Amino acid sequence: HYPYALHSVGLYNVGTLIDNALTRSSKRDRVLLGDSGGFQLGRNSQPYGYKPLKAGLTASEAITAWHDAEELKNWIIGSLTGSCNMAMTIDVPLWATYEKNLASAFNQCSVTELIALNKGTLDYIENVSVSQSGFRWLNVIQGLNKFTIDAWIDAVHEFRHGGWALGGEAGVQGGIESVIYTLKRLEALGGFNDRNTWIHVLGVGTAEWAVYLTEIQRCLRQRYESIKISFDNATPFSQ
């Protein structure tokens, strides 16, 4: 059987006990990569069915609602660590600020506010989850351009517990040049040490990108033998 799969908690309501073929399978027999649902946080009103994160909030209201959302954050963390081998950190992508994403509770936040909010979420994960033996968190890197990619990396790069995940303009939305730029920035900060060897690229599933990422992996392995790059297009439980 093919031992790799992706599963997103963003498809479920907060408090749900997620029970399906993927979550029931043994961690020893597969690698299940968990998606924390950042897409839903950036796009939808009341993601995970969590009513306080509703459309129309001011930046201050959204930040307060997220700070108070311990029930939601604990459920996401518990769902991921309970059934997955590794997972993306919880992130609110910067593209939540785009006009087309007015439904997101975070639409009125500034880039600076969202970067600070995401750094705070990493601190929360560090405090409540990182001590769990063997679980790997892939630190999500986001951005809208090189300037905001740099600002995001500067804020979060010290969280190193398994690897990295590239989203938004730091990933395929920015094109191959942006992906390479992001990886070079992480490398310059010593981001590919023995513990941070998995790189996941979000939201891509084309043959063209498979070739690009395979070649990038081959080049990185000349310096870091254990590096592995994965990518995803969709979860099998999406509608």
Image (cartoon, rainbow, N blue to C red):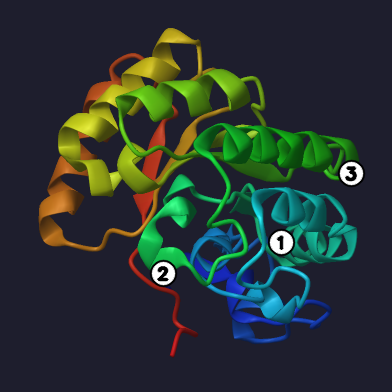
Mark nearest the camera among 1 and 3 is: 3
Location of residue 219 by image quarter: top left
Mark nearest the camera among 3 and 2 is: 3
Q: Residue 32 versus residue 152: which sits nearer the camera? A: 152
Q: Amino acid type of disc 3? A: Val
Q: Amino acid type of disc 1? A: Leu
Locate residue 105, reporting x and y percent.
62, 63
Locate residue 180, reporting x and y percent.
25, 27
**Numbered badge on residue 80:** 1
**Mark 1–mark 3 contact, CB under 8 Å?**
no
- 95 to 195, vertically: above or below: below
Q: Which residue is mark 3?
A: 128
Distance from the alpha carbon under mark 1 to that under mark 2: 20 Å
- 161 to 67, vertically: above or below: above
* Residue at 34%, 27% in the rendered image: 182
Seen as rendered, the residue at the extreme bottom is 239
Secondary structure, mark 2, is loop
Crowding around mark 2 (Cα neighbors within 10 Å: few <14, some 14 to 19, many 20+) is few
Q: Which residue is mark 2?
A: 2
Crowding around mark 1 (Cα neighbors within 10 Å: few <14, some 14 to 19, many 20+) is many
Location of residue 70 by image quarter: bottom right
The earlier-in-sequence mark between 1 and 2 is 2
Q: Amino acid type of disc 2? A: Tyr
Crowding around mark 3 (Cα neighbors within 10 Å: few <14, some 14 to 19, many 20+) is few
Q: Is residue 186 left or right of residue 213?
A: right
